[in-house]
Image (tube, helix red, strand yellow):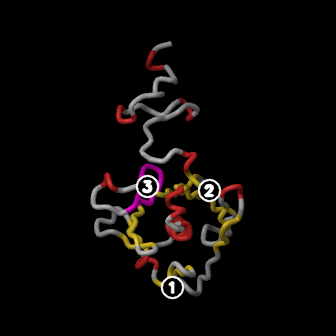
Amino acid sequence: MAYAQNPYSNWNTDSSSGGSPSILGALPYTNSSYPLPPGDLLTFTFTSLNPNILNCTVLGPNNRAYFAISTDATMPGCTARGLLQKQKISHWLRLSPDRSHRVIEIRGARYMWGPQEQYISLWTSGSNMRDRRCLARISKTYNIVSLEMAAEAMQLGLLEACVITTVLLQCGRNID
């Protein structure tokens, strides 16, 4: 077998060396820019879209229902008891001046939502990129929306804010 066709060639290689995904994703791919291993993530899936994510059920670990999302179209805005007083979405989830990310303040701390590969990722806010940590990511494949959160994000009490943000960013409506 030629070296270029060796499906194991990416194993135990330095992730900065490049490399490409393994065949059909069946083997490890060491070049992921997402800093958390899948075992450290809690996954929440938005299901029963009726007719869309603005009215749905959020399932968490063990397929347990964590939230029921319902939208009253006659009263636009966003509110969450103990987290967010009713306000315009664009004030809570502010678009940066360069339009590259959104800034959000949760429980007195500032975070950033921005695109990363096929995800929208939540990062701690820091002036230096090396100081930032990825805490959560949103993905959508076909009609399945998922929110993956690091244990640290859960400990910081970010679950509700991340669920609300997922709905807002995936609803297909202009939020500005």
- Point out residue 82 in the picture as x, y percentages from the top left corner: 54, 81
Q: Name the residue under label 2.
A: 144
Q: What numbered label is drawn on residue 134?
A: 3
Determine whether label 2 and label 3 are within 8 Å by CB.
no
Magenta stretch containing residue 120, yes or no? Answer: yes
Query: Pointer 1: what residue?
Result: 86
Q: SS at mark 2? A: strand
Q: Earlier in the sequence, mark 2 or mark 3?
A: 3
**Residue span colored magenta:** 114-124
Q: How far apart are marks 1 and 2 (CA)?
A: 28 Å
Please name which of the two marks, 2 or 3, marks the residue nearer to the observer: 3
- Say what amino acid the circle numbered 3 marks: Cys
Kind of residue at badge 1: Lys
Looking at the rendered structure, which numbered label has been put on residue 37? none
- Measured as percent of width and height from the top left, residue 28 is found at 52, 33
Count residues near mark 2 (Cα–Cα under 10 Å), then give few for <14, some for 14-19, many for 20+.
Answer: few
Q: Work out how far the residue at label 2 is from the one at label 3, CA to CA, in angstroms.
A: 22 Å
Q: Does the magenta stretch include residue 5?
A: no
Residue depicted at 28% across the width and 56% down the height:
128
